[in-house]
Image (cartoon, helix red, strand yellow):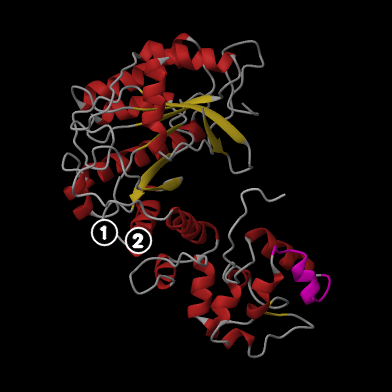
């Protein structure tokens, strides 16, 4: 229990543990243990909104690397602990049978060598899959410095694999993680991409070809530990999506740690900055924004504004693109209207085939019609000078309010 307390707490800094895109397996036929379906000590959320509980731990928090931002670095003064692969497998099965979890998210510090640590991670997954026929979700954090064959074995057992790029710039990685190399990290990601693609091709040709990381691969970047701006981070994320077909890029706001290195900032960045980066990620993935357009929404310091979302910031800078006629505009133009999400745009496109839309009709499809009004035209509404008002940003920015501790 003491080891579990230490290693579960040490794993909390890794945000890339969502379990979407995995293969669907279950044990309803009377064989095996576990399932990747249904409701299930970490909570991840699938695209359909399901909450999936994962046992999220490190195999060990011993590490031979000395990354300045990491609480488990070699020079850090923390309690150390270590599990064996069989102990992690037993914990996973015990927690699953008690209905605590639906799967495992396993990472580790580097002990002895990268290859030795990767062998232990793979052995844990092998015990679960082969000895216990575990059919639940497994996410393995792979080590880019390890032998590619070991990473390939991890992909055969895991639903998803991830390799953290850690920091958005090469200079930041060199300064804060001297034991890591960006070329090595991206080389490992490229190898994983090729293996996933090859597996998909083999599955099309051979019915019983083994699955390889059916949930794809993901990565994580630390925000605020170095001088990288949001523009740097957005640019890095877009290149990772394009070059390695990642399922997700996660952002983790730097958190000050005990016995911190002198090269680290004294204060953590605002959590809202992390949130704005996730919103910008959504704009690129689902709203058709190019990375350069998201960068155009940043302010003079290269960071996204904290008081308004990136789509509104972009719209305020490019007011000549508005207002948009909801009865005639293309899907691409409607997706750029602040306050309209992908579902609302789909409903607008479907509804206008049968009738001419009015402002009340649009208001029923969005949370705040006040946010939408300056940027659209309908049969009964035209914003006239509202779109060009100098104080439009202050009118649309969320109002700051002091919450009451004992409010009813």
Furthest toward the front, the residue is: 406
Q: Is residue 74 left or right of residue 24?
A: left
Magenta-drawn segment: 354-367
Q: Is residue 233 left or right of residue 324?
A: left
Q: Is residue 137 above or below residue 343?
A: above
Give percent across and percent down for residue 321.
55, 82
Please state, as top left, top right, bottom left or bottom right, where the N terminus lies in the image.
top left
Q: Is 361 within the magenta?
A: yes
Name the residue carrying label 1: 227
Could you tell which of marks 1 and 2 lies nearer the N-terminus? 1
Q: Is 242 within the magenta?
A: no
Instruction: For label 2, count other residues whose C-alpha is less than 10 Å away and answer few (under 14), some (14-19) or many (20+).
Output: some
Q: Secondary structure at mark 2?
A: helix
Q: Is residue 151 above or below residue 233?
A: above
Give percent across and percent down for residue 340.
64, 66
Q: Is residue 236 left or right of residue 91?
A: left
Query: Is there any visible trace of residue 332 in the rendered image?
Result: yes
Q: 230 or 243, which is in the foreground?
A: 230
Q: 55 or 72, which is in the foreground?
A: 72
Instruction: For label 1, count other residues whose C-alpha is less than 10 Å away and answer few (under 14), some (14-19) or many (20+).
Output: few
Residue drawn at (44%, 53%) of the image: 271
Report the magenta stretch's main SS.
Answer: loop
Residue drawn at (38%, 60%) of the image: 234
Q: 312 or 122, which is in the foreground?
A: 312
Give percent across and percent down for residue 213.
44, 32
Q: Is residue 296 above or below residue 267?
A: below
Residue drawn at (75%, 64%) of the image: 350
Name the residue carrying label 2: 235
Task: Tell me how far mark 1 sits from mark 2, CA to CA.
Answer: 15 Å
């Amino acid at each position: 229990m003491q080891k579990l307390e230490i290693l579960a707490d040490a794993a909390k800094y890794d945000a890339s543990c969502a379990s979407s895109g995995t293969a669907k397996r279950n044990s309803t036929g009377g064989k095996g243990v576990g399932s990747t379906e249904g409701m299930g000590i970490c909570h991840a959320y699938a695209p359909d909104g399901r909450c999936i509980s994962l046992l999220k731990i490190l195999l060990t928090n011993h590490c031979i690397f000395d990354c300045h931002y990491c609480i488990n670095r070699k020079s850090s003064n923390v309690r150390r602990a270590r599990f064996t692969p069989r102990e992690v497998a037993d914990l996973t099965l015990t927690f699953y049978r008690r209905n605590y979890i639906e799967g495992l998210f396993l990472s580790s510090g580097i002990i002895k060598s990268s290859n030795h640590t990767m062998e232990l991670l793979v052995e844990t997954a092998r015990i679960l899959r082969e000895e216990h026929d575990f059919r639940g979700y497994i996410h393995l954090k792979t080590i880019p410095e390890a032998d590619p064959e070991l990473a390939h074995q991890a992909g055969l057992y895991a639903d998803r694999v991830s390799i953290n790029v850690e920091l958005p710039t090469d200079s930041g990685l060199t300064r804060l993680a001297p034991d890591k190399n960006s070329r090595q990290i991206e080389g490992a990601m490229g190898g994983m991409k090729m293996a996933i693609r090859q597996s998909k091709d083999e599955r099309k040709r051979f019915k019983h070809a083994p699955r390889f990381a059916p949930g794809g691969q993901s990565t994580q970047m630390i925000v605020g530990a170095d001088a990288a701006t949001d523009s740097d981070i957005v640019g890095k994320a877009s290149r990772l999506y394009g070059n390695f077909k990642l399922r997700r890029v996660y952002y983790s706001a730097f958190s000050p740690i005990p016995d911190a290195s002198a090269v680290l900032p004294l204060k953590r960045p605002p959590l809202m900055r992390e949130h704005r980066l996730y919103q910008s990620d959504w704009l690129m993935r689902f709203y058709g924004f190019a990375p350069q357009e998201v960068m155009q929404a940043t302010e003079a310091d290269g960071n996204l504004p904290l008081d308004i979302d990136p789509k509104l910031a972009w719209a305020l800078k490019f007011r000549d693109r508005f207002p948009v006629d909801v009865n005639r505009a293309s899907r691409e133009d409607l997706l750029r209207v602040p306050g309209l999400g992908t579902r609302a745009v789909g409903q607008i496109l479907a509804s206008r085939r049968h009738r001419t839309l009015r402002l009340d009709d649009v208001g029923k499809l969005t949370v705040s019609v006040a946010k939408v009004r300056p940027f659209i035209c309908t049969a009964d509404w035209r914003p006239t000078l509202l779109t060009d008002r100098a104080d439009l940003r202050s009118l649309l920015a969320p109002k700051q309010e002091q919450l009451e501790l004992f409010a009813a």
